[in-house]
Image (cartoon, coloured by chain):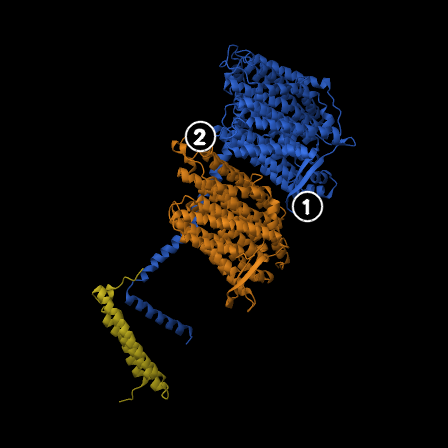
Chain colours: A blue, B orange, C yellow
């Protein structure tokens, strides 16, 4: 089967499922929706893996270098002869990897949902939205045109909105969905303006042309773009900064991260798919897609690196104090994506593209262990009926499979060899060491924090209280255990994939190097974090409370998420709504409309005054008539017109 | 093919409706007439596309001309090009949907449908006229019935709104007519004409352009809610019955945009270039200020009316930027907004018919009781906030792509501010969606309300299909639009540059 | 006794005109108002005759106009009296003050 028709099916099958289930509405497909969607996705996953395999092993390589392959292109909207939205299918190492990850994780989530959503009477819409999301995300990574990417980018945002707000009768879910959409929309504004600048700087919307014209710093296009500037930065820098802002919104980078923790109001499998493995890495993907252009601009790349580092540190601190297990995972996701961003940011500054490879590698491994963690959390919530870790404890005997899988994922994310997270984290730290020592220190700090909060979570859920036995419910169904087990196996093995041979910035294979001496520091820090977590949370007691008290103000600030939400609330409520919205509405009703109404009223009042002249009395009219004639005579006489 | 059928069919339908014996016949005749009209329009599109040279800039097909008042050289001169065909398709869709959503009307149904049909005849006449005087006649024909529709079948402070709408639109028409007269007398003695084609070939002197353009543009601008003459929109729309709101927002506001582009910009390119900074500034104000005002509305119809002000700002922005792509965007936005806002008003009307309230604070959780109507509401909302795959996205992006290349700080800043409105749009749409269809449904009165009837489903389906069509196949729609916008830009290129 | 000059005649007609105008404004009985209007018309007739006699003695235009006026005045009187009679039928009065429904 040719790869291009294969990719067509990969895109169109989820769309077909969405249309089918979406038209069916709430009533039909209550019990059949899950199987239909899952079987379709199984096919999609097979095709996607096949396409990725064909790319990596058969036709992708030319002369020892992986080159992007444009498999299809269709002019969807022609603006000018050179500027057009071409809907295409672009396969390069990154997108081949991404379609494999997305379809696979989506399949796992579909499988898991079969058990998790059992009994819900809105399964039709649920699987319809999941399929729509899968379609949009696959379309996003296969985009050959920056506007096509924006097209799917927005679709991803909307399907995420629909999924977060799936429990639409819960006020919190609706508010969270709204917040997620509006915050990412705000970031998309940056992306849109960035796209406009890039489009007119490169004279094209196709990625291939943009990259070839703007990454070659000697070309006339690149010189023009980096010459003219605004506020001290060149046009190209502005474009990249704005594009990155768009990516930062989707990837929940500080300070646009506020939507991600709230987004946990959605069904847990959805969080595993969207808010762990796929949509939140769209920002990383976007930077990676335009990486050759980013490399030419030190300012933009520095911004990427520092934003990533700050997010990684802040999110790790916030994750240490959360009580809601899904929120801990959300902050951990933020922190890990910050890791990927910082790796991208330091790449190309002496790292010979090591950072790029490391970021992609971490994206790859993170997708598996983070979705595993979320699915585990889903299984736990399914049994405990609570998100709060205070309500849990001692679950290891009741849920042995979940326990094992969760432990593997925790070890992986903490970077304990030989699990997947260790390898990718090492690469990132190595890249940071080569690129920027400050960022390296931040990365090291984060790896310690990561181990601490993950094991805080682990011990609180599975150890802590010994006697807690929750509702005597059996552990999850087979459909829920199976995806967890598959993901656990992959988490163990994924680190051994010779990733640097496949996905690199320039398509040339890199030598993987794991330096044992170099690994000592992060692994030791991680072990220390685990030990600390075991000390505080391994057994029941008031140790955590005392520790919290000891930290005092720092604890409170972290618990309140650094008051960033409050700052946003102030900006939206007090400035946007009260400061701009209400005055606009008032001004419109009173001033602009008032102007119209007062014109009408003024004319009315004037008529009221003069209407008395029409008295109905004959002799008055005669008087006016004669006075008029007299006046005319006088006028003619005075002006000399006789 | 004689395009006069576009006038004759609705007029005849109105007569037949007038002769109907009972309410049931009235509805059936009106429905049959509008369906016939839609089919004829579809046939027109097919025939249009088979004509050689339909996509040549400036090509006008199916021309007919009858002397109407020979001493003043006024002819009933009609013909279509891609631009007007697109608007005619929009009109036929919205009118049919309007008839369908009015299916359950009980007060004076015969008069209601007759007025609706006369309105539609006015709109068709406006779009096919090539003689400005006749076009003005149809413009007026599309105003007067609206007064009655609102004053008789409306809700709320309907007399006030009807009066305000009629007076403001009449004031706009008065400006238009003054401008037309000036254009007429600008011609050489003996060769004076109201004919659009004739005037297009004749280079109107720059001085005449400079004082005529503001008259015509502001006059038509009132129809398309140019700031600060937009206040008839919220009051008029919110008091009007559903079908009239749909017509008002879907078609009537497009008459203004069509006139601005077809008459003002096309005939007076030099003045258009001269005044374009003003247009751009007014459009940007309308876009941003309209969307901020929308954010604070409590009444769904007010909300949609203010959002129409904001969306029509994109039409004006596209026209003001005066690039070929931005004009394409303006026309696409006219089509998109016409369908989307009509769909939105239809959904609001359906909700109001059942709950008898449009206040955000009193609604909530409707998705559970009326899933179809709620889905339509969400679809229209998503189109309004520019979801890819729906028409709003295509139109707004085309406007942005057309606006960016216009050099100059003012234009850049305006474009970025217009882009920023997509965020505000998201805020107010999601606010409305969250408060109307989502959320807990705690009002027991709403618990057993019915979902949409067949007529409402067909109406929503028609407009939803149109939205999807533009959103998914914009290249097909652009085949109609691009020749005409190219022609207008060529006209501007040929014009004498302003000293 | 000096000959009667144009100015004497004009003085008479002006007097007649203003007497008529005074009547028009002050009388409340419509018949009297009508008589006042006739006075004003006749003052104009005198003017026509006088100007004809003194300025263009060889022509008869003024005389024709006067005759025309008299005819019109007769018709006007007929119409006016018809109106007055109708007014009397509806209002039981021919007082101008009583007939002022035709106002704002």
Toward which corner of the image does residue A375 lie, by quadrant? top right
Q: Where is the C terminus of chain A found, in terms of image quarters?
A: bottom left
Q: Where is the N terminus of chain A found, in terms of image quarters?
A: top right
Which chain is mark 2 on?
A: B
Q: Residue A82, which numbered label?
A: 1
**Residue located beneath label 2 in the image:** B440
- In the current view of this chain or complex, which residue is farthest to the top? A467
Q: Nearer the viewer, residue B163 or A318?
A: B163
Toward which corner of the image does residue C13 lie, by quadrant? bottom left
Asked whether the viewer can see residue B111, the reply is yes
Q: Residues within 10 Å of mark 2 (few under 14, many from 20)?
A: many
Q: Position of residue A211 (x, y in %)?
A: 70, 38
Q: Is residue B419 above or below residue A313?
A: below
Q: Is residue A462 left or right of residue B369?
A: right
Which residue is at 48% across, 58% downward? B137
Q: Is residue A354 left or right of residue B416?
A: right
Q: Nearer the viewer, residue B432 or B344?
A: B344
Q: Does dot 2 land on a helix, a strand or a loop?
A: loop
The answer to whether the residue labelled 2 contacts the one labelled 1, judged by CB atoms less than 8 Å apart, is no
């Amino acid at each position: 089967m040719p790869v291009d028709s294969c990719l067509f099916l990969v895109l169109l099958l989820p769309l077909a499922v969405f249309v089918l289930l979406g038209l069916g509405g709430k009533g039909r497909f209550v019990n059949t929706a899950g199987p239909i969607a899952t079987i379709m996705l199984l096919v999609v996953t097979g095709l996607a893996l096949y396409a990725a395999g064909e790319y990596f092993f058969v036709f992708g390589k030319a002369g020892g270098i992986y080159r992007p392959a444009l498999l299809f292109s269709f002019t969807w909207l022609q603006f000018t002869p050179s500027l057009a939205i071409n809907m295409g299918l672009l396969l390069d190492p990154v997108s081949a990897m991404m379609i494999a990850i997305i379809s696979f994780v989506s399949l796992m989530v579909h499988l898991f949902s079969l058990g998790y959503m059992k009994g819900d009477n809105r399964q039709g819409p649920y699987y319809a939205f999941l399929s729509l999301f899968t379609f949009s995300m696959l379309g996003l990574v296969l985009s050959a045109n920056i506007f096509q990417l924006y097209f799917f980018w927005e679709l991803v945002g909307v399907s995420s909105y629909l999924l977060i707000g799936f429990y639409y009768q819960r006020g919190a879910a609706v508010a969270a969905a709204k917040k997620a959409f509006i915050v990412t929309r705000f970031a998309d504004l940056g992306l849109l303006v960035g796209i406009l600048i890039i489009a007119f700087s490169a004279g094209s919307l196709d990625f291939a042309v943009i990259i070839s014209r703007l990454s070659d710093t000697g070309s006339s296009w690149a010189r023009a773009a980096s010459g003219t500037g605004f506020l001290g930065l060149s046009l190209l820098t502005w474009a990249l900064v704005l594009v990155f802002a768009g990516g930062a919104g989707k990837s929940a980078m500080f300070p646009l991260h506020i939507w991600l923790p709230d987004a946990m109001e959605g069904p847990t499998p959805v969080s595993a798919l969207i808010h762990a493995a796929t949509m939140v890495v769209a920002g990383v993907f976007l930077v990676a897609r335009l990486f050759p252009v980013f490399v030419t601009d030190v300012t933009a790349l520095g911004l990427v690196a520092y934003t990533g580092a700050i997010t990684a540190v802040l999110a790790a601190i916030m994750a240490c104090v959360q009580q809601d297990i899904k929120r801990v995972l959300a902050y951990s996701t933020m922190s890990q994506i910050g890791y990927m961003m910082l790796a991208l940011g330091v790449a190309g500054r002496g790292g010979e593209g090591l950072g790029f490879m490391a970021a992609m590698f971490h994206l790859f491994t993170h997708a598996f262990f983070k979705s595993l963690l979320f699915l585990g959390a889903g299984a736990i919530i399914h049994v405990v009926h609570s998100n709060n870790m205070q309500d849990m404890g001692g679950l290891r005997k009741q849920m042995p499979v979940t326990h094992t899988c969760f432990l593997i994922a925790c070890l992986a994310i903490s970077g304990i060899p030989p699990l997947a997270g260790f390898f990718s984290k090492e690469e990132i730290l190595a890249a940071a060491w080569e690129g920027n020592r400050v960022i390296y220190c931040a990365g090291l700090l984060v790896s310690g924090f990561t181990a601490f909060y993950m094991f805080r979570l682990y011990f609180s859920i599975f150890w802590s209280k010994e006697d807690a036995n929750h509702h005597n419910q059996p552990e999850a169904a087979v459909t829920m255990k199976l995806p967890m087990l598959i993901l656990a196996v992959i988490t163990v093995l994924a680190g051994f994939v010779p990733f640097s041979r496949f996905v690199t910035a320039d398509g040339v294979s890199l030598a993987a190097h794991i330096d044992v001496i170099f690994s000592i520091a992060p692994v030791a820090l991680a072990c220390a974090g685990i030990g600390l977590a075991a000390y505080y949370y391994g057994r029941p007691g008031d140790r955590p409370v005392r520790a919290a008290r000891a930290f005092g103000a720092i604890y409170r600030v972290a618990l309140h998420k650094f008051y960033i939400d409050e700052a946003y609330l102030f900006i939206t409520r007090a400035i946007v709504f009260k400061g701009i919205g209400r005055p606009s509405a008032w001004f419109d009703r009173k001033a602009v409309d008032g102007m119209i109404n007062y014109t009408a009223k003024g004319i009315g009042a004037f008529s009221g005054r003069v209407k008395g002249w029409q008295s109905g009395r004959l002799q008055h009219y005669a008087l006016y008539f004669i006075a008029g004639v007299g006046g005319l005579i006088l006028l003619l006489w005075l002006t000399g017109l006789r | 093919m004689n395009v006069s059928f576009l006038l004759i069919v609705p007029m005849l339908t109105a007569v037949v409706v007038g002769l109907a014996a009972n309410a049931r016949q009235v509805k059936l005749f009106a429905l049959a007439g509008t369906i016939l009209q839609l089919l004829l329009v579809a046939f027109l599109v097919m025939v249009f596309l088979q004509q050689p040279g339909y996509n040549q800039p400036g090509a006008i097909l199916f021309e007919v001309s009858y002397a109407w008042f020979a001493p003043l050289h006024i002819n009933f001169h009609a013909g279509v090009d891609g631009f007007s065909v697109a608007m005619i398709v929009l009109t036929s869709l919205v009118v049919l949907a309007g008839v369908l959503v009015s299916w359950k009307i009980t007060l004076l149904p015969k008069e209601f449908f007759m007025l609706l049909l006369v309105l539609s005849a006015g709109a068709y006449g406006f779009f096919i006229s090539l003689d400005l005087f006749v076009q003005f006649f149809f413009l007026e024909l599309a105003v007067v019935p609206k007064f009655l529709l609102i004053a008789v079948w409306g809700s709320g402070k309907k007399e006030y709104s009807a009066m305000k709408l009629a007076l403001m639109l009449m004031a706009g028409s008065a400006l238009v007519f003054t401008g037309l007269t000036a254009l007429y007398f600008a011609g050489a003695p003996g060769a004076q004409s109201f004919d659009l084609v004739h005037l297009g070939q004749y280079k109107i002197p720059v001085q005449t352009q400079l004082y005529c353009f503001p008259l015509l543009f502001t006059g038509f601008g009132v129809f398309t809610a140019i700031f600060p003459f937009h206040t008839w929109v919220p009051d008029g729309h919110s008091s009007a019955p559903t079908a009239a709101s749909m017509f008002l927002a879907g078609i009537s506001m497009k008459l203004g945009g069509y006139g601005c582009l077809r008459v003002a910009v096309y005939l007076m390119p030099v003045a258009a270039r001269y005044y374009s900074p003003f247009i751009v500034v007014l459009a940007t104000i309308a876009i941003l200020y309209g969307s901020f005002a929308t954010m604070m509305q409590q009444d769904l119809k007010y909300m949609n009316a203010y959002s129409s002000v904001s969306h029509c700002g994109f039409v004006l922005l596209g026209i003001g930027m005066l690039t070929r792509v931005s004009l394409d965007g303006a026309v696409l936005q006219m089509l998109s907004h016409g369908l989307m806002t009509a769909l939105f008003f239809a959904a609001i009307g359906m909700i109001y018919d059942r709950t008898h309230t449009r206040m955000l604070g009193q609604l909530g959780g409707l998705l559970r009781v009326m899933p179809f109507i709620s889905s339509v509401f969400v679809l229209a909302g998503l189109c309004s906030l520019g979801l890819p795959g729906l028409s709003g996205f295509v139109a707004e992006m085309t406007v942005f792509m057309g606006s960016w290349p216009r050099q100059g700080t003012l234009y850049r800043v305006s474009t970025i501010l217009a882009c920023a409105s997509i965020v505000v749009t998201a805020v107010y749409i999601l606010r409305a969606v969250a408060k109307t269809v989502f959320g807990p449904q705690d009002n027991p009165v709403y618990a057993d309300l019915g979902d949409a009837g067949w007529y409402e489903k067909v109406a929503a389906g028609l407009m939803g299909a149109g939205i999807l069509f533009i959103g998914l196949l914009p290249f097909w729609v652009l085949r109609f639009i691009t020749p005409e916008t190219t022609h207008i830009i060529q006209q501007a290129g040929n014009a004498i540059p302003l000293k | 006794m000096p000959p009667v000059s144009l100015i004497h005649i004009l003085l008479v007609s002006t007097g007649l005109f203003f007497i008529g105008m005074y009547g028009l404004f002050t009388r409340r009985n419509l018949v009297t108002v009508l008589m006042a209007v006739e006075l004003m018309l006749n003052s104009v007739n005198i003017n026509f005759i006088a100007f004809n006699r003194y300025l263009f003695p060889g022509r008869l235009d003024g005389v024709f106009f006067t005759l025309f006026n008299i005819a019109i005045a007769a018709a006007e009187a007929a119409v006016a009296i018809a109106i007055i009679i109708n007014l009397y039928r509806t209002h039981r009065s021919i007082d101008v003050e009583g007939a002022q429904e035709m106002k704002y």
